[in-house]
Image (cartoon, rainbow, N blue to C red):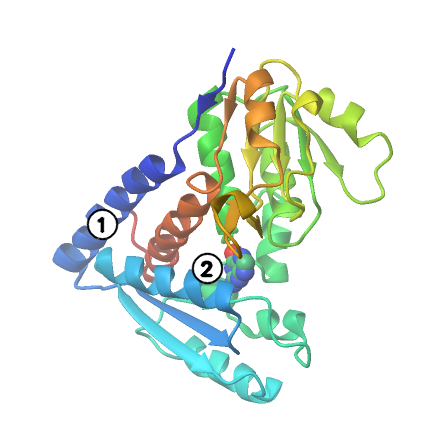
Amino acid sequence: MTAHIIDGKAFAEKVRAGVQANVSTLKEHHNITPGLAVIIVGEDPASEVYVRNKVKQTKEAGMNSFHFDMPADTPEADLIAKVEALNNDPAVNAILVQLPLPKHMNEAAVIEAILPEKDVDGFHVINSGLLATGGDGMVPCTPSGCLMMLKDTLGDLSGLNAIVVGRSNIVGKPVAQLLLNANCTVTIAHSRTKNLREEVLRADIVVAAVGRPEMIKGDWIKKGATVIDVGVNRIPAPEKGEGKTRLVGDVDYSAAAIHAHAITPVPGGVGPMTIACLLASTVTATCRQKGIEL
Ligand code: GUN
């Protein structure tokens, strides 16, 4: 058996088409154009690629994009002042500060400066608290994309055993919370977990978000499980020529595909869904701020 490949690119296109339709409605019937502001501090090459894509797709969806590049040595107070100015700007409905921030900054303090209703990443403690208590806050984009793909593949997730490998605030913890909200029995595994192989083998759903290339082996996957690989790791690819690299996930894809019912590829799985969900969340934030139901 070879697994069904979950096509994140095609799914993201469908989500973006829905966003575009909603943006048109907001413009035509309410005279509102949603605005997303993205701030990047410093020159991390991976972050620059992500932000370029976010800006491009925001514009393609018909929304206003506000993009701010700040130098790596920007004082934290200046970044917070920028966030506060955007909080007070009525043309800005959603604010995203690209992470990681330079070492001299306190990420939590910067995130807490964002108005919770404009916190499109859903990282503010108010939003993580709402997610944990069943409220209607802003939901982090990558976890939201993971759940959409799981529900599309499996339908009702009730009662399924899910394991999340990784416990970051950006992916691991919120995706575990969303799985719990979808009535899964959830295990969160991390670097101190004992017998990780056995834990993964019990799972009907495996979400890998550790950031370690191909750490989850094919024979750890239960027959018929669904695998969502959030990892994006660049590794040397001497077979492509000297100095060449390629992207791999946190799961040994080809070996896992032999056991799995369905699996996301890297690239082309979770990645495209993250930006699509960011655009959808920008529309959600706008509608909530304006009291509009689409
Ligand atoms: N860096 C990596 N992923 C993310 C994300 O989802 N949001 C932000 N703001 N920064 C990130």
Q: Amino acid at mark 2?
A: Val
How many other residues sit within 10 Å of disc 1, few (<14), some (14-19) or many (≥20)?
A: many
Residue 30 location (% of width, % of height): 18, 59
Above or below, 218 relative to 277: above
Q: Disc 2 on helix, strand or loop?
A: loop
> Which residue in the protein does label 2 denote?
120
Circle 2 packing at 10 Å, graded few (<14), some (14-19), many (20+), is many
The answer for how far apart the CA atoms under marks 2 and 1 are is 17 Å
Q: Is residue 246 above or below residue 53?
A: above
| Nearer to the camera, 215 or 157 | 215
Label 2 vs 1, first from the N-terminus:
1
Q: Residue at x 41, y 44 (%)?
A: 273
- For the residues bearing labels 2 and 1, Cβ distance under 8 angstroms: no
- Residue 12, quarter of the rendered image: top left
Is residue 78 placed above or below 110 in the rendered structure?
A: below
Mark 1 highlights which residue?
20
Indicate which disc residue 191 carries.
none
Q: Quadrant of residue 109?
A: bottom right
Tell me which amino acid carries mark 1. Gln
Outermost residue to the left:
28
Residue 122 in sight in this render: no
Q: Position of residue 201 (x, y in %)?
A: 72, 21
Residue 152, percent from left and from top? 42, 26
The residue lying at 58 percent from left, 14 percent from top is 224
